[in-house]
């Protein structure tokens, strides 16, 4: 389902204590706001409006470096005003398109939560993700005994909250209560049907200083590790040098292929694409396309690495094995590792290049061709 998103990030974060407002602070090395933008991009949001203060403007470009598909709107004095500013900035989108309104202060947004909210919107005017209250509740006035209060039918509201843009615009225009604390409440007051979608315990709102320590611990749980493997082989032919793992090696033959035939980079590119479920190298760079004739294969690897970044992921380590009788790989291994580390912006100890012969057996053993296999570990949001 096509949808757009409004991320409200114009608050001052007073309760989180002194220092930078919470949406700009880091959790697991990543700005709080960036977590949500990446989650919406990974789920295919058609447009993302980020609502910030004027001061936030420049910070935004640093915080969202490398990401596209977002625009900005100026926040208001309250969350509700910031939401309305974000909705106004979506004027070019279809008025009946679902809009997901999300607190920047909730970094651990998953694709499942987004999908659940959108699914529930098929039968409702507005949807909020929520969790049932699990603790016993007490109402306590100063100097009085706490009074136990039923927790039955009580839910903790989270974001993103969804409604079609026209529904939200009409409901906010009709709102005459005090300060609404969420968007579903505004649709509810306008007589709309509000549904609850599954909330997520990880989707906590950073509110108090101590929440940041908790978020650091949750950051590990909010990410998954994926593994991808790739394989490639090319035939030997007449030539004077061969490209392997991004390094040119003088040799009495070359590998034949549509691009520079760097089997090491091709296997590694496929491993990365495999880890993130993005098909294979041929899907992205068809061998039938003359554009890629003689292309330097580091371009393919960079593209795969950029797809990982766009999903909010990071490559953990890569391991390439080259399979050939000749040339000898050992003298070039360090240069290959350094080149791969440079292309992928990884520390050297996370890049491995190995080599083996097949003891004169098979096509590599007979010197007909060279093969390469690669394994990669990638971390992405769950
Ligand atoms: N005028 C406002 C107030 C809040 N928000 C956003 O609404 C979300 C939820 O608000 P809250 O957690 O209350 O954030 P703050 O208002 O920043 O925090 P505090 O109340 O502690 O100052 C946050 O992402 C916040 O940036 C906003 O865009 N504009
Ligand atoms: C919208 C909200 O996240 C729902 O739980 C929440 O109400 C926003 O925070 P605030 O402290 O009420 O501004």
Image: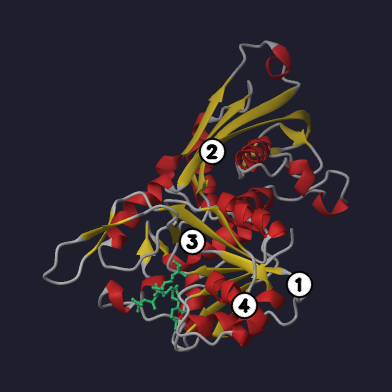
Please give the residue where the numbered disc 3 appears in the rendered image. Answer: 35
Mark 2 Cβ and ligand 1 under 8 Å apart: no
Residue tagged by mark 2? 226
Residue 54 versus residue 166: which sits nearer the camera? 166
Q: CA distance from mark 4 to mark 1?
A: 17 Å
The mark that comes first in sequence, 4 or 2, is 4
Q: Secondary structure at mark 4?
A: loop
**Badge 1 is on which residue?**
96
Residue 90: % across, % down: 68, 79
Question: Looking at the image, is mark 3 or mark 4 earlier in the sequence?
Answer: 3
Image check: 211 left or right of 65? left
Quadrant of the image occupied by residue 259: top right
Going from the N terminus, do you reach mark 2 or mark 1 first?
1
Near mark 3 (Cα within 10 A), the count class, few <14, some 14-19 or many ≥20, is: many
Q: Nearer the viewer, mark 3 or mark 4?
A: 4
Drawn side of residue 262 relative to residue 198, left or right = right
Is 263 in front, or is 135?
135
Against 29, is 284 above or below? above
């Amino acid at each position: 389902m096509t949808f757009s998103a409004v991320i409200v990030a114009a608050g001052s974060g007073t309760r989180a204590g002194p220092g930078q407002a919470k949406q700009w602070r880091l959790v697991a090395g990543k700005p709080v706001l960036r977590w949500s933008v990446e989650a919406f991009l990974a789920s295919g949001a058609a447009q993302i409006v980020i609502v910030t203060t004027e001061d936030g403007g420049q910070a935004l470009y640093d915080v969202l470096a490398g990401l596209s598909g977002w625009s900005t709107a100026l926040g208001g004095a309250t969350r509700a005003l910031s939401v309305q500013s974000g909705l106004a900035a979506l004027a070019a989108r279809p008025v009946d398109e679902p809009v997901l309104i999300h607190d920047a202060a909730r970094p651990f947004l998953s694709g499942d939560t987004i999908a659940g909210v959108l699914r529930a919107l098929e039968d409702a005017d507005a949807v909020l993700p929520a969790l049932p209250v699990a603790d016993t509740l007490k109402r306590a006035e100063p100097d009085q005994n706490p009074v136990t209060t039923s927790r039955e039918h009580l839910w903790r509201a989270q974001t993103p909250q969804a409604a079609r843009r026209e529904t939200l615009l009409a409901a906010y225009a009709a709102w005459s209560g005090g300060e609404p604390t969420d968007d579903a409440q505004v649709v509810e007051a306008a007589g709309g049907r509000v549904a609850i979608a599954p909330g997520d315990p990880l989707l906590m709102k950073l509110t108090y200083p101590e929440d940041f320590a908790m978020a650091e611990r949750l950051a590990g749980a909010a990410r998954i590790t994926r593994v991808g493997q790739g394989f490639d082989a090319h035939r030997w032919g007449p030539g004077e040098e061969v490209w392997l793992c991004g390094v040119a090696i003088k040799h009495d033959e070359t590998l034949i292929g549509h691009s520079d035939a760097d089997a090491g980079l091709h296997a590694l590119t496929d491993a990365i694409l495999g880890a993130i479920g993005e098909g294979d190298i041929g899907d992205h760079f068809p061998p039938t396309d003359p554009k890629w004739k003689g292309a330097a294969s580091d371009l393919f690897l960079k593209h795969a690495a950029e797809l990982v970044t766009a999903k909010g992921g990071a490559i953990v380590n890569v391991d390439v094995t080259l399979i050939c009788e000749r040339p000898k790989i050992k003298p070039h291994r360090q240069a290959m590792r350094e080149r791969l580390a440079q292309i992928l912006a990884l520390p050297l100890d996370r890049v491995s290049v190995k080599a083996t012969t097949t003891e004169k057996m098979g096509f590599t053993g007979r010197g007909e061709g060279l093969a390469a296999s690669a394994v990669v570990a990638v971390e992405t949001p769950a």
